[in-house]
Image (cartoon, rainbow, N blue to C red):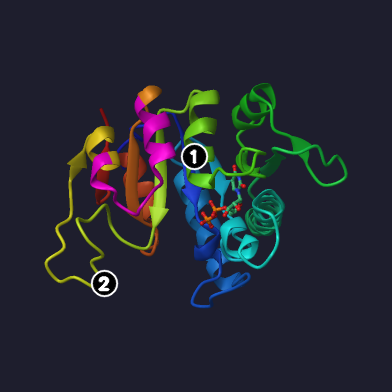
């Protein structure tokens, strides 16, 4: 089997994906499948940190239109990402692989605080590190968190796991003429306004010279394929 192309990556996993075919909550068979995939990919020898989203429970923007302030809604969203991390951590450890959740918030009874040194330490110990709580600030997303954390922990790429196999010119589920891009620059990704990731995330990746690989996590084994450089996806790089 080919050696991995990357020494260390951050994988962005949306909360929505953890709901499986449901629109809300946690789908345990899906979480188990992702845990197994992460463990197999990790066995290739790449350090893996996972930034987990919270869209399967709360998105600040959605709840704030119902009379709640955006920062309050966003705080709820960030807490939702912690619940997802704990579910994924339990699934990974249940399969006998070591994992560790680090939080952007101080919550000592639940999780250790994210610091660069803690992340380096647990990755060096061979754990799959799960990063919860987003950036710890409202008005950001976990896409931006993934790029931020990747830059902080000296990762070589951000792997953005989605339902589709890359960035398309339009929604491929709605437009049969949608074109898939093999490669885009960060600037093209921002100017194209593609919905796959927010512009703040692309802009920070441009500034920190981090490639983003957008790929589908729907096929088992796809994380490992991307790590070996044989996966299908769109590379967004400078
Ligand atoms: N969030 C936030 N700051 C962050 C990251 C996330 O306020 O740094 C909140 C925001 O309300 C967001 C929610 O947490 O809608 C869940 O994150 P996201 O929407 O990125 O999750 P995903 O869509 O990937 O499941």
Q: Nearer the viewer, residue 153 or 227?
A: 153
Residue drawn where x is 60% and y is 31% of the image: 123
Q: Nearer the viewer, residue 175 or 86?
A: 175
Mark-to-mark CA distance, 2 and 1: 25 Å
Residue corresponding to mark 2: 173
Q: Does any atom of ligand 1 lie closer than 8 Å to the CB of label 1?
A: yes
What is the quadrant of residue 91 in the picture?
bottom right
Horizontal side of residue 138 vs 169, given as left or right: right
Horizontal side of residue 9 vs 67, given as left or right: left
Q: Quadrant where the C terminus lies?
A: top left
Q: Which mark is drawn over residue 144? A: 1
From this viewpoint, is residue 94 visible? Answer: no
Q: Which span is picked out in magenta?
A: 191-206
Q: Residue 214: say if magenta.
A: no
Residue closest to the far front: 67
Q: Is disc 2 placed on a helix, strand or loop?
A: loop
């Amino acid at each position: 089997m080919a050696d991995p192309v990357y020494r260390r990556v951050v994988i962005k996993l949306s909360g929505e994906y953890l709901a499986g075919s449901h629109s809300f909550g946690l789908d345990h068979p899906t979480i188990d499948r992702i845990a197994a995939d992460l463990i197999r990919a990790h066995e290739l020898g790449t350090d893996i940190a996972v930034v987990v989203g919270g869209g399967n429970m709360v998105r600040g923007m959605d709840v704030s239109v119902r009379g709640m302030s955006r920062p309050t809604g966003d705080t709820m969203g960030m807490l939702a990402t912690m619940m997802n991390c704990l579910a994924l951590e339990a699934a990974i450890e249940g399969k006998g692989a070591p994992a560790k959740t680090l939080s952007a918030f101080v919550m000592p009874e639940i999780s250790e605080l994210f610091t660069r040194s803690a992340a380096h330490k647990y990755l060096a110990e061979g754990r799959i590190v799960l990063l919860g709580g987003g950036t710890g600030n409202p008005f950001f997303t976990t896409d931006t968190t993934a790029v931020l954390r990747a830059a902080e922990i000296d990762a070589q790429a951000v792997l953005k796991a989605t339902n589709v196999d890359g960035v398309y010119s339009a929604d491929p589920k709605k437009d049969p003429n949608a074109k898939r891009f093999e490669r885009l620059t960060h600037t093209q990704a921002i100017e194209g306004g593609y919905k796959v990731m927010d512009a703040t995330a692309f802009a920070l990746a441009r500034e920190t010279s981090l490639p983003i690989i957008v790929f589908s996590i729907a096929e088992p084994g796809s994380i490992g394929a991307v790590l070996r450089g044989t996966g299908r996806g769109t590379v967004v790089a400078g």
